[in-house]
Amino acid sequence: MTNQELALESVIECILEYGQYPANGKVQFDLYDFLFDKRDPSYALELLVASMSSNTQSFEERIARERKTVEALLVYALTDSILVANRAAEDAE
């Protein structure tokens, strides 16, 4: 993997884990704002309905599907971004 690919992976993992990048300090990327702009808000209601269901297995599957969808959106949006380029430069130091 290239330094750029590793940086992209690291940034996306942080965003998915903490809902922002970086995890601490001044926020440079906010997942809530990103999803508000990029996704139909009905997906959030679908997750809420699923969370109230007694079928926890289907809820876990729904979360996994949503996570993959969001990850794909993040890869598309952040590949070749300044945010990732800066992270790659920091990692190279």
Image: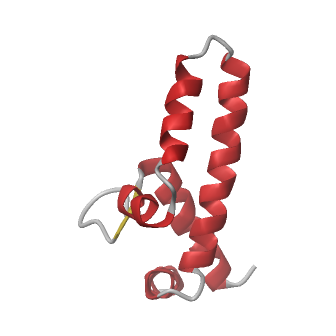
Picture residue at 42% right of the left edge, 52% below the top: 19
Residue 5, quarter of picture: bottom right
Q: Quadrant of the N terminus?
A: bottom right
**Farthest top residue?**
54
Q: In x, y percent, where is residue 86?
A: 44, 85
Q: Is residue 73 above or below residue 14?
A: below
Please tell me which residue lies in front, 25 or 15.
Answer: 15
Picture colour scheme: secondary structure
Please tell me which residue lies in front, 39 or 31.
Answer: 39
Q: In x, y percent, where is residue 55?
A: 68, 15
Q: In x, y percent, where is residue 30?
A: 36, 62
Please tell me which residue lies in front, 13 or 35.
Answer: 35
Q: In x, y percent, where is residue 32?
A: 38, 55
**Farthest left residue?**
26
Please tell me which residue lies in front, 79 or 40.
Answer: 40
Residue 29, quarter of picture: bottom left
Picture residue at 72% right of the left edge, 25% below the top: 58
Picture residue at 65% right of the left edge, 27% below the top: 59
Left or right relative to 16: residue 30: left
Left or right relative to 64: residue 70: left
Picture residue at 56% right of the left edge, 58% below the top: 13
Residue 90, quarter of picture: bottom left
Left or right relative to 4: residue 45: left
- Count of all numbered marks drawn on residues in the image: 0
